[in-house]
Image (spheres, helix red, strand yellow):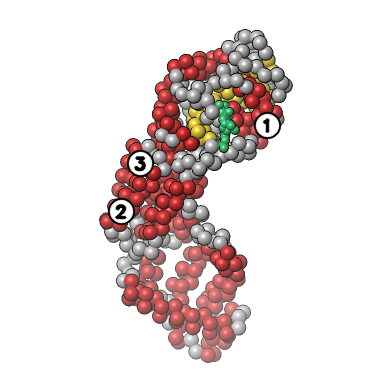
Amino acid sequence: MFDTLSERLSGTLANLRGKGRLSEADIDATAREIRIALLEADVALPVVRGFVARTKERAKGAEVSGALNPAQQVVKIVNEELVSVLGGETRRLRFSKEPPTVIMLAGLQGSGKTTLAGKLAFWLKSQGHTPLLVACDLQRPNAVTQLQIVGERAGATVFAPHPGASAAGHQTQPGSAERNGVGDPVDVARRGVAHARDKMYDVVVVDTAGRLGVDEELMRQAADIRDAVRPDETLFVVDAMIGQDAVATAEAFRDGVGFTGVVLTKLDGDARGGAALSVREVTGQPILFASDGEKLENFDVFHPDRMASRILGMGDLLTLIEQAEGAFDQEQSEKAAAKIASGELSLEDFLEQMMAIRKMGPIGNILGMLPGANTGQMKHALAQVDDRHLDKLQAIIRGMTPAERADPKIINGSRRLRIANGSGVAVGDVNDLVNRFFEARKMMKQMAGQFGFGGGQRSAT
Ligand code: GDP
């Protein structure tokens, strides 16, 4: 799911990498590509328009951050916009102060409601709840039996109508006889909730009937069940693989029954999935859960931020960007950039930068957040990274006087020995650091000349 979108978006953003500045034309081109990526992924047109317009506007007025280069800022903006389209903050299930909490499931036939009922029960149990599943889908052949089977798998009790009787309900053993087309679903729902109250179940999940398409009868029945049990949450269940129809169906359910949250199912499918991404924005209701397989455990609370970074294929790069923003102070970064440009970087600056990086955590972890960190060579290289080496460098620099840090050329042989002794390292280590520092400074000077560094890391607006 989202593979094409993910590939295109990360490809587009990768093209920006390495650009010191972004021109207006760069931003326009990027916005165009983002638009194509979203449209190809089946994201609804109004959602695409809003997304692209906001991203473009923000990228042009790029919020200046000392720690991020312009390309990283665009990644950050796109990520934030994606998180926002997906709903912003994670929305948790709301439980009633007076149990039982009633959760009603609504959606088209085949959207995955019955499967979801089992998953929800399984998840609720893991959270310490005692759920009761109520079988109100009395239309689809086998729906009650199917609910009983998933209920049994989840270890949850199912409340279903008596075989052959109408307007009656009782608790059944999972997997017992099939009951088709019997009973009044509204009455079963009402009795199910009363049963839960009597028997101290604290959450009731009401599975309702769906149709292959949206029709009035379906809406009326769902609305009647809603009025009978007054659910705390009505979850609209939508198959992420149905494409643009997802948006139209969501609108029909919003107007016909109303819902408080969305559950995306079949996210494991290989479809484009963009329509599912549009449901939140189009209906204004949050996505609460996502399901990505037929097994009970293929289900989780939906986290907009995690889904966005999954779509962007950025691994933990976004976490890294955030941590960098926290660790570096803009003024300090700009000063360092200017010094690099003029080739005046001192060991004091080097120490400051190193300490800022280390505020972000162990160096191996920081590098491990970069895309590609889990691939063969990089993984091996990361295993060699040792914070003790950085400790040693820090100790050596701290052993120098401010004048020596500013200009290591003045450190003669006897001072090198004193510094080595003072910081508990060999003279060779001190020589090594000083020599490498000179090399690095030379290289920075050359690079600065070549690429025209300097003047901080602002984007051209
Ligand atoms: P209902 O008619 O809304 O109750 O839908 P069902 O729960 O019967 O689901 C319809 C079909 O979709 C069944 O074959 C389920 O096994 C399947 N299904 C449900 N959720 C998922 C999912 O997240 N991933 C996949 N691959 N299949 C699912």
Mark 2: which secondary structure? Answer: helix
Q: Position of residue 425 (x, y in %)?
A: 60, 80
Q: Amino acid at mark 3?
A: Val
Q: Which residue is mark 1?
A: 154
Nearer-N-terminus badge (2/3): 2
Q: In the rendered view of the protein, which quadrant contains the C terminus?
A: bottom left
**Residue appearing at x 48%, y 54% in the figure:** 314
Q: Nearer the viewer, residue 363 or 140?
A: 140
Q: Position of residue 221 (x, y in %)?
A: 50, 16
- Work out whether 270 lies above or below 407: above
Q: What is the distance, in whole Å, between disc 2 and disc 1 at their CAs?
A: 50 Å
Residue 43 falls left or right of residue 370 = left
Q: Residue furthest top?
A: 166
| Residue 43 position by quadrant | top left
Q: Which residue is mark 3?
A: 48
Q: Which residue is mark 2?
A: 29
Q: Amino acid at mark 1?
A: Ala
Mark 3: which secondary structure? Answer: helix
Check if mark 2's residue and mark 3's residue have beta carbons within 8 Å.
Answer: no
How many residues crowd mark 3 within 10 Å: few (<14), some (14–19), many (20+)? many
How many residues crowd mark 2 within 10 Å: few (<14), some (14–19), many (20+)? some
**Residue appearing at x 63%, y 36% in the figure:** 296
